[in-house]
Image (cartoon, helix red, strand yellow):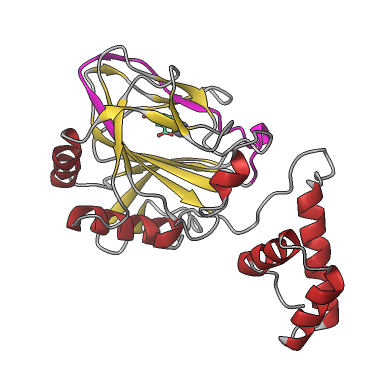
Amino acid sequence: MQPISPELREWIVAQLAAGHSVPALRQSMHAAGWRDDATDAALAEVERATRGDAGAGGEAPARTDMPGPNLENSPLYLDAGDRRVQVVQTVKHPRIVVFGNLLSADECEALIAAARQRLSRSLTVETKTGGETLNVDRTSDGMFFERGENEVVQRIEARIATLLNWPLDFGEGLQILRYSPGAQYRPHYDYFDPKEPGTPTILRRGGQRVGTLVMYLQEPQQGGATTFPDIGLEVAPVRGSAVFFSYDRADPATRTLHGGAPVLAGEKWVATKWLRERTFT
Ligand code: PD2
Ligand code: ZN
């Protein structure tokens, strides 16, 4: 059976939304060389997805192709192209990997220096509307780099793509956050809530988020761990290290609730890379 690619799925959805009939679609796909059984399977899948069918337990269906490091044979180090990255800790469910030595001190400094003058109070994507709003749950200051915006951003993005086996252009631009004393990021999920009305608009730019990499650029003197309340894990914000986690569905069943604990002393800086299902535009 021919695989149903995200592009084909999107094309079918767009054709149906434009008012083309199912028989007309079937005819176009037949003319394009699709076998009728594959066409029917693709149409049925799109119909299931648009009806919002749940899995056996009532949950959303899980993706199978996911970002993440290759941990076969329990490596202590991974080759991320231009750097040897340490595997410090792993959790299976939720899938979490803590990396050491992902960034050099110079790279951390360069990101902070380039971001500092562009910081403003952080906005979060607003799934109610598809826009962005100030969110009291996040009291840090932040900014976004464009993907590939400068040499150091390019180098780090290429390294992440190699390390996590996920195409570079499926990633959002790097987000930089600065937490001053008292600042925190209350526990949340990084995927977009499918029940919110603004989510379809957000998903047009590359589908759902499926993974997060939080990289620590500057460690505070106290506090500021990245917390996973469902499993009681706290990741210390050590400069140059990072925590990766992935979520194969937009559902709390992924146990990826996480937050940034309040910074008690000093300043914490992080860079976050969010990974989408497909090309982020
Ligand atoms: O800065 C953190 O530790 C943190 C915690 C939770 C960052 C994010 N979420 C994020 O950028 O999504
Ligand atoms: Zn988050």
Magenta residues (range)? 249-270
Asked if the magenta segment contains residue 255, the reply would be yes
Q: Is residue 63 left or right of residue 90?
A: right
Residue sitting at x 57%, y 38%: 192
User: Does 212 sit above or below residue 18?
Assistant: above
| Residue at 46% across, 60% down | 166
Work out whether residue 172 can be spotted.
Answer: yes
User: In what quadrant of the picture does the N terminus appear?
Assistant: bottom right
In this view, the residue farthest toward the front is 19
In the displayed structure image, the side of residue 109 where residue 54 appears, left or right: right
Residue 93: tell me if it is visible.
no
Q: How many marks?
A: 0
Q: Residue at x 68, y 62 (%)?
A: 14
Q: Quadrant of residue 237?
A: top left
Residue 18: percent from left, percent from top:
71, 62
Along the viewing direction, whichever of 279 and 201 lies nearer the viewer: 201
Q: Position of residue 172 (x, y in %)?
A: 41, 50
Queried whether the magenta region covers residue 93, the answer comes back as: no
Instruction: Tell me where residue 57 appears, x and y as whole percent.
Output: 82, 39
Which of the pair 190/67 is nearer the observer? 190
- Lateral position of residue 86 relative to residue 151, left or right: right
Residue 85, percent from left and from top: 31, 52
Image quadrant for the C terminus? bottom left
Comparing 64 with 178, the one in front is: 178
Quarter of image, res 260: top left
Viewer-side residue, 187 vs 72: 187
Kindly indicate the quadrant of the structure image that contains residue 105: top left
Residue located at (37% from left, 51% from top)? 76
